[in-house]
Image (spheres, rainbow, N blue to C red):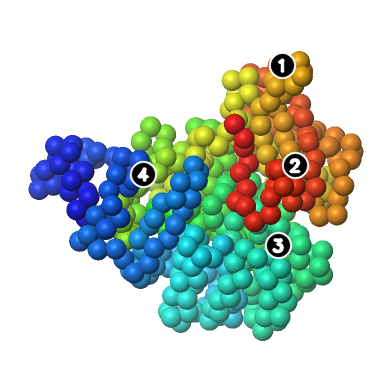
Amino acid sequence: MPAYGAFLAEHGVDPQRVLTYQDFVRLPLTSKDTYIRRFPLPELCRDGVIGDMIAVSSGSTGTPSFWARSAADERVIADRFEEVFRDAFATRGRRTLAVVCFALGTWVGGLFTIACCRHLAERGYPVTVVAPGSDRREILRVIPELAPHFDQVVLLGYPPFLKDVIDAGTAAGVPWRDYAVKLVTAGEVFSEEWRTLVAERTGMTDPALDTASLYGTADAGVLGNETPLSIEIRRFLSTRPETARELFGSSRLPTLVQYDPDVRFFEEHGGTLLFTGDNGIPLIRYHIADEGGLTPYDRMLAFLRERGFQPAAPGPERPFVHVFGRSHFTVSYYGANVYPENISVGLEQPEVSAFVTGKFVLEAVEDSRRDRRLAVTVELAPGVTPSDKIARAAGESVLTHLLRLNSEYAAYVPQHRQTPDIRLRETGDPDYFPPGAKHRYTRG
């Protein structure tokens, strides 16, 4: 890695003198701005040679970044897929159709997921991959044709897109309950209400064994994965925001996964995460800027026992990492930080969820009197038209759960300004919900 040698020299570090853990934690942090974007791609790679594949990520700013990959990277990350497929989905004894619903092409998710699933087949798992990508019509064309030949169907994609697929399939008469559906998601934090909702709509019997979220980044692939144990813990905490606050320092419910420190080494830094890992571009003390933290396995179980909870699900004796996501995906309103996941829970309640897709845009706006208002623009489900009844139900549900989950909102926002303005838009509205685009839940 010629670039890293130059980077250390700039900071006056002699790599020959980095011998202990104390030496390691004094190494300068790397990041996309301070390291990746400052050097040509070959210099970032081992021995100055680009790997056998390149993936592209747009990032939150839209500026593309290029990430070298290799077959060795795929094999390591396939271990995370194997853990999910083996321990949760019991794939060893079940013919499994893996339907890759991430975007294909140069983008990070699709082709990499295909490669990892095919590694499972090479390891002897009865897994067959089909890759319709993010074309919903193609997904709903291939599944009814292929699913009857398999014991279970695993859909892999971003949470809101998978829900779109499930809802559109239901409307088209796809018999999800006949297919023993499992879900593998990545890219976004979702609520346990969301997990329960999609489980009900697909006929899942146990969400802790039928779903799994991966904590992945464009920079280094999959860093950790949900296990039945981490899901059971998260579902326990989802109904106890004060306990979640004790554990995570916030009543927000983060993604909670387990990770292998021999492969991806995490550190905490000022409430955010650093990791070190070998990839096509090796990364050392890389500051991903995700808000989150770490909990050792023994400390997690002791914390739960002290509060009267003993998880029943098995799980590896590995540490936990929790991830809130990037801090700039929030809206400030009367000094309170409002997070998209606070809103999601309200829209996922039974009295509302049948009328909406789950997508929304959160904004703090000025009204005609120059007063600040919290606006939530909500996408309606296909065939549903705007009505005052739906807007009122959505507003009441969002407010109830916003006050329950976000004590800062309850304390900071004057009571007469707490009720959000609900603005309903039809499916695929070009201004807020353009089809095919990666959805963003906030606007500045």
Mark 3 Cα shell of 10 Å, populated few (<14), some (14-19), many (≥20): many
Mark 4 Cα shell of 10 Å, populated few (<14), some (14-19), many (≥20): some
Check the picture and name the quadrant holding the N terminus. Answer: bottom left
Question: In terms of secondary structure, where does tag 1 sit?
Answer: loop
Above or below, comparing residue 35 to residue 179 in the picture: above
Image disc number at residue 370:
1
Cα separation, mark 4 vs mark 3, equals 33 Å
Reading the image, the residue beneath label 2 is 378
Picture residue at 50% right of the left edge, 56% below the top: 214
Picture residue at 66% right of the left edge, 59% below the top: 162
In front of the other: label 2 or label 1?
1
Cα separation, mark 2 vs mark 1, equals 23 Å
In front of the other: label 1 or label 3?
1
Reading the image, the residue beneath label 3 is 165
Cα separation, mark 2 vs mark 3, equals 18 Å
Reading the image, the residue beneath label 4 is 32
